[in-house]
Image (spheres, coloured by chain):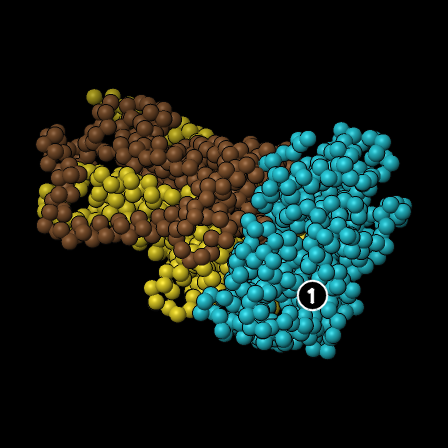
Amino acid sequence: MTILKLADDGRPGKQDDVRRRKAASPEAGSRRIAGPLITKRLLSWLGIVLYGGFFLLPIAFLISLTFKTRDEVLLGQFFTSKPVLENWWKAFEFINLAGFIGHSVVIASLSALLTVALATPATYAVARLQHGEFVGSLVLSSYIAPPVVALLPLFFLMRCLGLLNSFSGMILVDGLMNLPVAYWLLRGFLKKVPAALDEAAWVDGAGFFKTFLLITLPLLVPGLFATGLISLILAYNEFLFASLFAQDDRVRGLTVAISLFQGDRFVNFGQMAVASIAGIVPVYLIALVFQNRLIGGLTVGGVK
Amino acid sequence: MSDLDPKLTVSGLNRRTLLAASASMVGGGMLQLSPLLRSGAFAGQQLNLTIIQPHAVAGEVLKKLFQDQAGVTLNFTVIPYDQVHAQATLDVQSGANHFDVHDYWYASIGALVDDKVVVDVTDWIERDKAQIHPEDFIPSIYDAYTRVNSRRWGLPYDGDSHVLFYNTEILKRHGLEAPATWDAYYQAVKTITEKEKGGGIYGTALLGFKVPVIIVSSYANRLAGFGGRFLKDGRPDLLSEESIAAAEELVRVAPYALPTPSETAFDQALPAFLSGKVAFLEFWTDLGVRAQDPQNSKIVNLWDVSQLPVGGKNKTPVAALDAGFGWAISSGSNKKELAWEFVRWASSGEVGLKLLTTYNSGIDPTRSSTLNAPEYKSFAPKVQRAAAAAFGSALVWPTVAQTPKLLDSLTEQLALILAGQSKPKQALEAVQRAWERELV
Amino acid sequence: MNSSKAALQVDLAKSRGGLDQSRLVVAWLMLLPLLLGLLIFAIYPSIYVLGLSFTKSTLGQPFKAYLGLRNYHWLAFGGDDIFVPSLLRAAIFSICVSLVELGLGLWLAVLLASMQRLSRLVRSILLLPLMTPPVLVGTAWKLLLAPGGGLVNGKLLSLGIVDAPISFLGTQPWALLSLMVADAWQWTPFVAILAYAALRQVPDDVVEAALLDGANATAIFWKIQLPMTAPLLLAIFMLRLIMAFKTFDLLYILTFGGPGASTDMAGFAVWRTALRNFDVGTAAAETVLFAAFVSLALLPLLWLHRRVERIAS
């Protein structure tokens, strides 16, 4: 299915796109930008290095912590003179770390799916089908208050539904919790997908839902992945609900497990750091897999 | 033989140590089982308990013992030490009723009773007096931990108090002795810090992080030393001479402590002391065990411990009952009989002694018999000496229903004076007002 | 001819009417799951919390006694001098931090968009702070900033920049600044990744056309990329602002509201009232006040968002 190319004034553009695209490819573009401005390029590089350094520093520090014994932690140095490996296997041996991480991954992934599944059609309904304008504000107003006190009625509700200390309960809670974020992000992404395509399909007699599924969704894929990943990360790192609804070892997740390290008086930072690094790995892998879908792929005028 | 689940412990327990300890237990003497338990009447059943993270190792020991002796499985849910109250309350209030027994902080007993979260066990104690030996409990602990409105609501099992740890090497360098008064303490800290802070060594690590059990403990230690108390006949007594002196003492030493008290919690203070960077530390007695463990400590045999100093007109050392835990039965439990059997058993002298002499159990004595037991003396001689000397009289934290709010306003004001944003007298006046409003 | 044209128009009108009808139905069907979720998760608890705010309630005994507006009166005028200042501190913190994160994140996104090969590597690194469990973010920064042996102080001392360690978390204004730095570290990637996705959605040929017309990178950014991504950027900013208002994990680990009361912020204060003091009645009133306060702050943003959306489309 070819999609009409649109020039910036909305009219279908000329078809001599091959030459144009070649001449204005990203490489050509950046060459044109950066060519006479070497300082600008240097500045970008400097920026990247500074950024990278800043963002990497605490992570690198955490990694170096995993190799330190307890008394080396607060020595004001980055590297340790005598690295130890014991934190690594000890952290896994003394709590069911792998299990807790597994729980977190399952809960976060499924809740992210739930979030996106609920939010996407709703965004479409408001933005394209133009009904339910109030949803945006409703969703936002449910997000602005700290959820602490809401724990009381939710605890009661979960208990009534038998969902305390269960996977489905946590998936439900985390899935619903991130609805506002998903809605507003998807709304922004949806606006970028031209409405003309949908309208054309409607005129051709396609049903609204079908259009949504077959025309809009494929174009929305990067936005879907971005939103899904953010929802996954937010659910993965959630602490408050997890600490109250999922304390049982069978469903306990990573954030609560780490709080146990924290809740000891003789905190073992090395093991805590191991738990954290190990916890980051699965989400990181998921994110890496998503990278392409997340960012690349969509250029209006190029989808076949 | 060991069917221990290695997945429950977190605090660096050595598996071999645990096996050794439990081997001695199983072969060892009779444990406090009721005839009912011994007969196997409850065999095959389960109990759900909350237990705080610092007691995770003790939980392991209890689990194995109870399984072997009574055939009952204990399902511990390990929770950070500051969350038991909330979990217990929600459990009952929402009708979930998942838990049977709780590892509760003694200061919260008033609130727990007021919210009907725990069960009145006075009659059971009376009935089983002969096995429980309530007179063996250290009197100040027994009343503080279990008594509300002249009824009893649990049994003590971890009798925490602060003692003064010090680094003998550093003190020797400056020709100092263990201070008997807070003033001598201040002078010692000042001397050490002024001379050695260039090398990163300070006189003391003053725990001032804005959590009640941390910052209020530091204040309580001084309040105890000066002979003051929190409540007098149910009314706040924070504007007494002793109370103000205690707050002033706290502020006085702050500039000479490990930078800075406002951000110093366990995670900074303990490594500092255990690596020889501070000379003094007010902490719970189980630090003594850890300080002798070469894997965790650089100051093995280079430390000693004494009771907290005294001050003002008071000349007798007073124990400050900072933290401290007991077992209580959840009012939502449908196994109250079995739960009571456990509570009785777990707070008994024999079980207590086993826990006391297990590495990293985090348990301190609650009974005179265990406090003075020869096994304890040989296990941790220095600590036993200091603890035994202090329990004569004790400063008890408030245990009324409003305790959480009382401690919150006290924490708030203490943090302000440590941060230099308020003066001791002014701050205590604010707390007094707040407390009066709550308690009236 | 006329009549058939008229007939066609009537037909069109009819089918348009029928179309409108089915559009309405489909829209509501698509909205239904979300609305159901909101009902369970937002509307029911909100009503409960609102009701709770008019009562004297503890965690164990909700709805103990009816108090009318007393909780609100106490918080706003009556002598509680903790909550209202915490709201103001939260406002300062979240506005500053969101603006910084928006700026840095956007700049980073633009940098990423102009790089080819390394961009994937940098993006991967970028995700790490976002994925780190919040407790560990706090712990890592606490250790980095510790005066007695933290990395930052260690370096500062060894380089001779200071003679005594700086207490980053124990003194003002460092405490608030440190919180902001830790928060920016954790959340700038959030903005950057989303902004990058937004930038990539700007149609290439628009950019190409501008380049062919001789525009330079800056002009392209300000005149094309920014306006086209403005709605999404504004949405990201709003979300980030609200999240920052509710900051909890960092406070719990780094300062607990100290030193003194200088970093005590509203989200943390509500938690303390509810789960430390167990005074859920007051906490409920605090929650309502919090929501009202943040709504006020959001209204201008929402209005701006609507305008920008209209312009961009």
Query: Quick check: A273 left or right of B305?
Result: left
Q: Residues within 10 Å of mark 1 (few under 14, many from 20)?
A: many
Residue plotted at (14% across, 47% down) = A34
The residue closer to the viewer here, A144 or A292, is A292
Residue that carries the numbered disc 1 in the rendered image? B307
What amino acid does circle 1 point to?
Answer: Gln
Please tell me whether residue B219 is drawn above or below residue B100 in the rendered image. Answer: below
The residue closer to the viewer here, C102 or C262, is C262
The residue closer to the viewer here, B234 or C67, is B234
Chain B palette colour = cyan
Q: Disc 1 sits on a residue from what chain?
A: B
Residue plotted at (77% across, 65% down) = B393
- Which quadrant of the structure image shows residue A2? top left
Residue plotted at (54% across, 64% down) = B278
Q: Quadrant of the C terminus of chain A?
A: top left
Chain A palette colour = brown
Residue plotted at (44% across, 42% down) = A277
Please tell me whether residue B376 is drawn above or below residue B310 in the rendered image. Answer: above
Query: Quick check: C187 left or right of C53?
Result: left
The residue closer to the viewer here, C41 or B409, is B409
Percent coordinates x, y for residue B216 in the rendering: 63, 64
Percent coordinates x, y for residue C138 in the rendering: 47, 52
Chain C palette colour = yellow
